[in-house]
Image: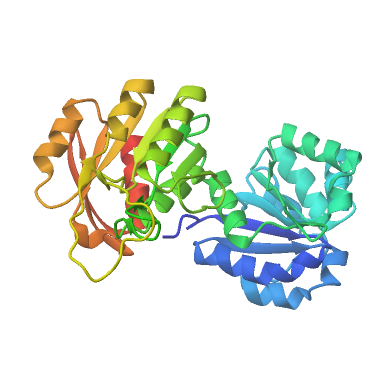
């Protein structure tokens, strides 16, 4: 799904060794539909040749400001660019932007973009000791106060490494899409639960969490503060680990109680039953009867606890009547799909609201976009 279709991103590159990753970053932005114009400092051009980014973007790289006033053409009033993305951004360039110094093509583009008020995203990269410098920290805070989106680096091996390309692209999409969910606290449950039968075996489902991931990343793109309760880890959101239904219930209710939730999306295959647990490992080779006990409905408890806008998922054939009952009980939307969709990359879904039913088919990302579009 090309969320950046029809948009132009200026990819500004400074003199960090992480500049070697920008060819892949340019390709990632273009795969999402963006037109990419690269701008490089002299130091960046000493690390990666401009021809590499010319190839990656399909456009000549700007390595100096000429009589064509490239910074104005792209980032001035009425300019062609929708976003200035500085990745990687060194401590030196961060300091210059914070002080309004224009002595490289990148800093000149930055000053022009900030004066215009267009979205600017910065992905710092440097040694960790430089990142911890109080002056650098103050400069970063100053950029943040101007509305610049700073992508936190990965602290590894004594370095503040530039964020991975998926994270950078997600921030670019978030900046361009206008953030209609800004200020909203979104809580999502995702993936399968695993209920222990003994010390070795669990009772679970075929859910992979693909739908929850798509919903969470789309909410992030739209500007929300997103928390996901699940057993995995998604980029750009807060991940709370939970394996069993009891752990998921406890985490969800804690977030509702302590932080508050505006929108709750129950996309997880939360266990309806848990087996009576046996100590040790049940010996193999003999018939076994497993007794299942019903578990509380987390969605009902969430709605009672903090009354958020709630999206439910119903899995199975002929679930329309049960979905309508949930709508009458206060659920804003029920997403109905059949078991073959579980674990699949795409499928068909029915989005049921009080206003009617919308049929959606496609990838999980396309379905997630349709869900949020219906809610906005």
* Residue 370 on image: x %, y %: 32, 47
Residue 222 shows up from this direction: no
Q: Nearer the viewer, residue 20 or 265?
A: 265
At x 52%, y 53%, the residue is 233
At x 78%, y 56%, the residue is 125
Q: Nearer the viewer, residue 330 or 242?
A: 242
Up the image or down, 141 lies above or below 328; here it is: below
* Residue 204 on image: x %, y %: 31, 55
Q: Which of 217 and 282 is in front in this view?
A: 282
Question: In terms of image quadrants, where is residue 293?
Answer: top left
* Residue 182 on image: x %, y %: 52, 33
Residue 53 shows up from this direction: yes
Q: In which quarter of the image is the C terminus?
A: top left
Question: In terms of image quadrants, where is residue 322?
Answer: top left
Locate residue 166 relative to residue 367 in the image: left or right: right
At x 29%, y 57%, the residue is 205
Locate residue 327 relative to residue 281 in the image: left or right: left
Locate residue 310 relative to residue 184 in the image: left or right: left
Locate residue 344 relative to residue 15 in the image: left or right: left
Q: In which quarter of the image is the N terminus?
A: bottom left
* Residue 361 on image: x %, y %: 25, 57
At x 46%, y 23%, the residue is 257
């Amino acid at each position: 799904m090309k969320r950046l279709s029809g948009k132009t991103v200026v990819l500004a590159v400074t003199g960090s060794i992480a500049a070697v990753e920008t060819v892949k970053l340019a390709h990632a932005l273009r795969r999402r539909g963006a037109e990419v114009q690269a701008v490089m400092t002299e130091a960046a051009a000493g690390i990666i040749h401009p021809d590499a980014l010319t190839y990656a973007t399909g456009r000549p790289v700007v390595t100096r400001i000429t009589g064509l006033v490239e910074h104005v053409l792209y980032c001035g009033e009425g300019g062609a660019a929708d976003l200035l993305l500085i990745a990687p951004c060194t401590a030196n360039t961060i300091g210059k932007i914070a002080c309004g110094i224009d002595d490289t093509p990148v800093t000149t583009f930055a000053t022009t973009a900030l004066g215009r008020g267009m979205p600017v995203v910065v992905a710092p990269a440097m040694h960790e000791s430089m990142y911890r410098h109080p002056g650098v920290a103050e400069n970063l805070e100053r950029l943040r106060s101007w509305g610049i989106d700073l992508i936190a680096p990965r602290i590894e091996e004594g370095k503040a490494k530039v964020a991975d390309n998926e994270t950078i692209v997600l921030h670019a999409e978030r900046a361009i899409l206008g953030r209609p969910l800004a200020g909203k606290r979104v809580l999502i449950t995702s993936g399968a639960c695993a209920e222990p039968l003994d010390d070795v075996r669990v009772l679970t489902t075929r859910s992979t969490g693909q739908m929850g991931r798509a919903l969470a990343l789309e909410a992030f793109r739209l500007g929300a503060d997103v928390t996901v309760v699940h057993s995995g880890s998604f980029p750009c959101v807060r991940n709370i680990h939970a394996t069993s239904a009891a752990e998921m219930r406890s985490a969800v209710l804690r977030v509702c109680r302590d932080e508050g939730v505006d929108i709750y999306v129950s996309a997880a295959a939360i266990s309806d039953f848990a087996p009576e647990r046996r100590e040790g490992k049940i010996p193999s080779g003999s018939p076994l009867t497993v007794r299942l006990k019903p578990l509380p409905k987390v969605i009902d408890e969430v709605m009672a606890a903090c009354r958020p806008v709630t999206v439910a998922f119903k899995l199975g054939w002929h679930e329309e009547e049960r979905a309508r009952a949930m709508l009458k009980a206060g659920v804003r939307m029920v997403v109905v799909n059949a078991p073959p969709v579980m674990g699949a990359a795409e499928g068909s879904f029915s989005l049921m609201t009080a206003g009617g039913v919308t049929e959606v088919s496609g990838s999980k990302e396309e379905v997630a976009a349709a869900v949020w579009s219906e809610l906005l």
